[in-house]
Image (cartoon, rainbow, N blue to C red):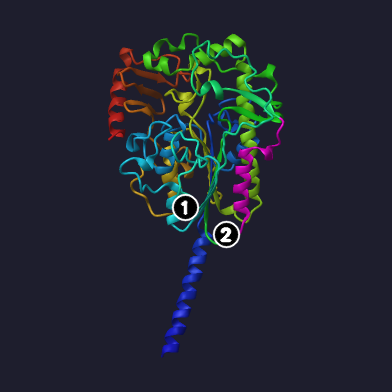
Amino acid sequence: MIKRINSSLVFLLLICGMITAQNNKKQPNVLFIMVDDLNDWVGAFGGNQQAITPHIDALAAKGVVFKNAYCSAPLCNPSRTSILTGYQPNTTGVYGNNEIFREIEGFKNTVTLPQYFEQNGYETAAAGKIFHNARGGSKDPKEGSDPGSFQQEKIGNAGTVYPDVKDRHSHNLKLKKHGVKGSFLRSFDWAATDTQDQDNNDFKSAQYCADFITQKHTKPFFVACGIFKPHLPWYVPKKYFDLYNLDDIKLPVVLENDLNDVGRIGNNMAKKGVHASLLETNKWKEAVRAYLANISFADACVGYLLNALQNSAYANNTIVVLMGDHGWHLGEKQHWSKNVLWERAAKTPLLIVDPRNKNVGVSTKIVSLLDVYPTLVDIANLPKKKDLEGNSLVKLLSNPNANWNFTALTTKAKNMHSLRNSTYRYTVYPDGFEELYNHNTDPNEWVNIAQEKSSKIILEQFRKELKTKLK
């Protein structure tokens, strides 16, 4: 009798083991790629037709491109915190680069995106800048980490200045003269280096993740790769600068006196001094070329990683998500950098490739990076996580043109928000000043129509929508 029970138990365990193995085999892997400070100057996203990004473009052709994706915050830490926790900045209270969400009351035990996958049987790994930092603005070597979010992680000093950059700050910019202060004086710089791709930290991050993918895995995996460029300073190998002829560089289309109708706070946030310095020294084209060169280098790092995935045993069962963390201005509205509430800072690439899904294409629906967490939970067939504040994009992955009526909220600070719908961008500042732009007729946000009588009903709708979002 005992032998019969033992035999039955062994048989049952074998069956359970076989079922578990089959489920693991079916469970998709996830490759999560985040490119720092990347605006839509990527071929597949159409923001700049001169951009040379063959690897991201090839990836985009295999999935769904979200051409109107917006960050929850136009700055690294609050944006990444929002993406990886699934909560808006006004929920966590993380608005700047120095707050740490785990030190805020109520968020110490927050289950981040990679942790949720780990809780559901996944092996997790990361390299490069995924979270903004571990200890606010400190120089701690674990910059980029949220300790405990990944089972294994390689974090280098993403901002390393390579010793062979001989032309540092050789552009004769008049930044101090034009009132530019703080870290921007040190970081706003560009130069072509004599390094090879493999000498650079971003490439090393891609290599680490590529090596992880090509290993034998008994569990499904979630691997995240953070690419630091095109974050300042713009130092990348010379061959990427050589892709662009300086004389052929086309500058963003701008409007003189564009800031006349944006109010006091908008004027104060714009880095007008940087723009004035570039105009005075005739370096605008150089700066644009440098940004493009850094994007092309980031694209090469992504390409190396994607090639490793394609040649691995997991190519047909790995979801790939690629995004920026927010946009970047290169002179539009006399602004350089991010951290403002205009379109160029809020908009960033997002694309999702699921090799099991044959529906590919371009979606122009308004989506948020906040939607990434619930979307990955859905398409990986994990249990619903009901506290997430974003919307699953599964509907758009099945049909990029499906009905979709959501707005995207971008937050700069408490009482400083911007809402984007399919037609308008509405922004309100702490002093009550409002901006409203009609993107059907004014895609560059040159004319603030908030003061027009015809905008009264639209403003009321946005004010009501914002109250709902902030509850």
Secondary structure predominantly adopted by residues drawn in magenta:
helix
Q: Which residue is mark 1?
A: 380
Tell me which corner region of the image, top left, top right, bottom left or bottom right, holds residue 437: top left
Disc 2 marks which amino acid? His
Residue 130 falls left or right of residue 427? right
Of residue 308 and residue 96, the one placed in the foreground of this image is 96
Residue 195 appears in the rendering: yes
In the rendered structure, the answer to whether residue 216 lies left or right of residue 259 reads right
User: Which residue corresponds to mark 2?
Assistant: 217
**Label 2 SS:** loop
Q: Position of residue 272 (x, y in %)?
A: 49, 14
Element marked by disc 1: loop
Residue at left offset 37%, top offset 26%: 418
Which mark lies nearer to you, 2 or 1?
2
Q: Residue at x 30, y 33 (%)?
A: 470
Q: Position of residue 137 (x, y in %)?
A: 45, 33
Name the N-terminal-most of marks 2 and 1: 2
Residue stretch rendered in magenta on the structure = 194-217
Q: Amino acid at mark 1?
A: Ala
